């Protein structure tokens, strides 16, 4: 039981540190917070705020869109949506949200309204696209290879992949769809029988793939660990569908070794914007086709 308590405490401390780090990013990047209230609180929809200050007990937001606010706001819940630049990966952005309770409302001598909010317990992805699965092909994901789960610290050059689209696409390996937290592969049964004759749900695999917003544009590189969730063999089509859920992400360090880290917001950093772009392109293509 002590081990369980220690694990719970560690998880709580990790979440609290993540929240505090994000508040620091919001303040330092002067990110705008979009506030969303229940209809019974206000009918105003475009309310934005700036984070002025925070500490271990709460945070202060300056709300320029309001001329005033009464005590009836106190005790209500507010959802805050924002976008920040990723600390660790240049050029990547995160779209995030948290829920918090309003503990106080002040109207300053300047006329500005300040909300005093409790610290959120956790922060989640605000990208609805994380749960959207989009059909893709090798033009969008030009490179994909995978292994049985690779340990952190391994030299990837020493590990031979189970499958590699560079050589196995012609043998029946293809990506079927993607989301920011999972993907599905289609593999010919002949290739499955020769490379992966036994598939066990819950087994872990490591992937490296590249993604492009559109053919010809620069590719972004991703390392992910994934758990096999679904297996479906279609004997008529002669192929097997493998459904994976991403569980961690990785990078190659200066010594060219693979390092894993937990997913921050239940999705792979930076992948959501590609899924969003692919989804937009798909709708545009459907619109053109239906015209």
Image: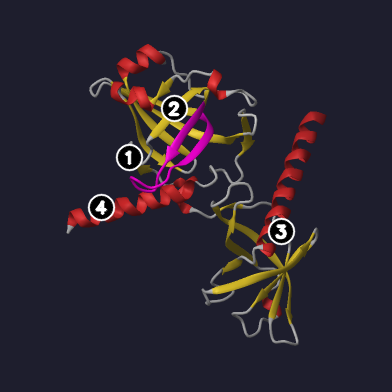
* Residue 108 pos. (x, y %): 74, 83
* Placement of 98 over or under 228, stated as above or below: below
Q: Secondary structure at mark 4?
A: helix
The image's mark for residue 24 is 3
Quarter holding residue 40? bottom right
Please name the residue that numbered disc 4 is placed on: 285
Task: Identify the mark nearer the N-term, 3 or 4.
Answer: 3
Task: Say what secondary structure mark 2 lies in.
Answer: strand
Label 3 near label 1: C-beta < 8 Å?
no
For the residues marked 4 and 2, what is the alpha-carbon distance in whole angstroms? 28 Å
Label 3 to label 4: alpha-carbon separation = 41 Å
Seen from this angle, which residue lies furthest left? Answer: 291
Expressed as whole percent of the image width and height from the top left, the position of residue 78 reads 62, 65
| Mark 3 / mark 2, whichever is N-terminal | 3
Marks 3 and 2, Cα distance to the nearest angstrom? 37 Å
In the image, residue 88 sits, relative to residue 73, either above or below, namely above
Badges 4 and 2: C-beta atoms under 8 Å apart? no
- Which is more N-terminal, label 2 or label 4? 2
Image quadrant where one finds the C terminus: bottom left
Q: Is residue 221 part of the magenta span, yes or no? A: yes
Q: CA distance from mark 1 to mark 3?
A: 38 Å
Q: What residue do we see at 40% from left, 14% from top?
A: 195
State which tag comes first along the sequence, 4 or 1.
1
State the image coordinates of residue 120 (x, y, percent, origin top left): 69, 57
Magenta segment main secondary structure: strand
Residue at the extreme right: 2
Residue depicted at 42% across the width and 52% down the height: 276
**Viewer-proximal residue, 1 or 250?**
250
What residue is disc 1 on? 139
Residue linked to disc 2: 145
């Amino acid at each position: 039981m002590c081990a369980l308590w220690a694990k719970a405490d560690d998880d709580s401390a990790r979440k609290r540190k993540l929240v505090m780090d994000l508040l620091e990013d919001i303040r330092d990047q002067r990110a705008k917070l979009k506030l969303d209230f229940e209809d019974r609180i206000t009918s105003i929809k475009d309310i934005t705020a700036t984070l002025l200050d925070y500490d271990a007990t709460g945070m202060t937001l300056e709300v320029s869109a309001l001329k005033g606010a009464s005590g009836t706001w106190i005790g209500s819940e507010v959802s805050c949506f924002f976008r920040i630049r990723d600390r660790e990966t240049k050029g990547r952005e995160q779209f995030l949200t948290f829920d918090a309770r309003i503990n106080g409302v002040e109207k300053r001598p300047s006329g500005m309204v300040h909300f005093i909010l409790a610290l959120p317990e956790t922060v989640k992805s605000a990208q609805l696209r994380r749960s959207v699965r989009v059909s893709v092909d090798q033009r969008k994901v030009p490179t994909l290879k995978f292994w049985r789960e690779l340990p952190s610290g391994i030299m990837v050059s020493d590990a031979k992949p189970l499958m590699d689209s560079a050589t196995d696409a012609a043998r029946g390996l293809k990506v079927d769809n993607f989301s920011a937290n999972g993907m599905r592969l289609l593999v010919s049964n002949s290739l499955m029988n020769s490379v992966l004759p036994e598939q066990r749900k819950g087994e872990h695999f490591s992937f490296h793939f590249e993604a492009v917003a559109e053919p010809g544009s620069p590719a972004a590189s991703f390392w992910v660990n994934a758990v096999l969730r679904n297996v479906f063999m279609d004997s008529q089509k002669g192929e097997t569908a493998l459904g994976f859920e991403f569980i961690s992400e990785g990078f190659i360090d200066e010594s060219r070794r693979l390092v894993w880290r937990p997913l921050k917001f239940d999705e792979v950093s930076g992948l959501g914007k590609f899924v969003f772009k692919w989804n937009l392109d798909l709708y545009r293509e459907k619109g053109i086709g239906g015209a």
